[in-house]
């Protein structure tokens, strides 16, 4: 099994973070991981909101988040465990992730209110 790629802190770029969080599903997944503050398996995100996410799409979303430097993934048997790298990213880009997540959560609340 090939090793998972996790960029070093120096290799994390703001455009990678912006790309990773530009997708609403990835933003929702990352917001959940960041807010939980503990290890979460990929299968915990099989549904986001009222949408069922196919396994192949879910794997791709986690890969994009991992390669952007937002999460760290570790294999444990057949499951993948994910943790947030918010603390590390915050030291390199103070306030960036918090601002993006706050904007995302604000939009999600506005969308809920309009339903």
Image (spheres, rainbow, N blue to C red):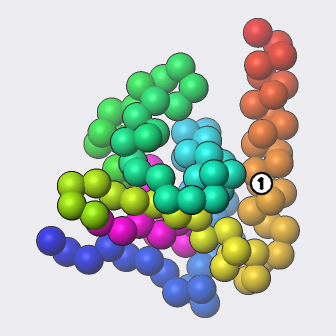
Residue 63 in percent (x, y) is at 40, 60
Residue 56 in percent (x, y) is at 29, 42
* x 77%, y 19%: residue: 112
Quadrant of the drawing holding the C terminus:
top right
Residue 15 in percent (x, y) is at 65, 68
| Residue 15 in sight in this render | no
Quadrant of the drawing holding the N terminus:
bottom left
Magenta stretch: includes residue 69:
yes
| Residue 35 in sight in this render | yes
- The correct choice, above or below, for 65 with respect to 87 in the image is above
Relative horizontal placement of residue 19, taking residue 73 as reference (left or right) = right
Q: How many marks?
A: 1
72, 11: nearer the viewer:
72
The quadrant where residue 4 appears: bottom left
Mark 1 element type: helix
* x 83%, y 75%: residue: 94
- The correct choice, above or below, for 54 with respect to 10 in the image is above
> Which residue bears the numbered disc 1?
100
Relative horizontal placement of residue 9, taking residue 52 as reference (left or right) = right
Q: Residue lying furthest left in this view?
A: 1
> How many other residues sit within 10 Å of disc 1, few (<14), some (14-19) or many (≥20)?
some
- The correct choice, above or below, for 102 with respect to 45 in the image is below
Residue 29 in percent (x, y) is at 56, 45
Give the magenta range.
61-75
* x 82%, y 45%: residue: 103
Magenta stretch: includes residue 60:
no
72, 8: nearer the viewer:
72
Q: Residue lying furthest top in this view?
A: 115
């Amino acid at each position: 099994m090939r090793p998972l790629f996790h960029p070093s802190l120096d290799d994390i770029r703001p455009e990678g973070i912006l790309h990773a969080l530009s997708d609403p599903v990835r933003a929702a997944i990352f917001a959940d991981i960041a807010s939980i503050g503990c290890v979460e398996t990929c299968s915990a995100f099989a549904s986001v909101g009222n949408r069922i996410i196919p396994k192949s799409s879910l794997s791709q979303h986690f890969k994009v988040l991992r390669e952007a430097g937002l999460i760290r993934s570790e294999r444990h048997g057949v499951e993948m465990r994910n943790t947030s790298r918010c603390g590390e990213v915050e030291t390199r880009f103070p306030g960036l992730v918090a601002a993006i997540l706050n904007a995302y959560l604000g939009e999600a609340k506005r969308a809920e209110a309009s339903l």
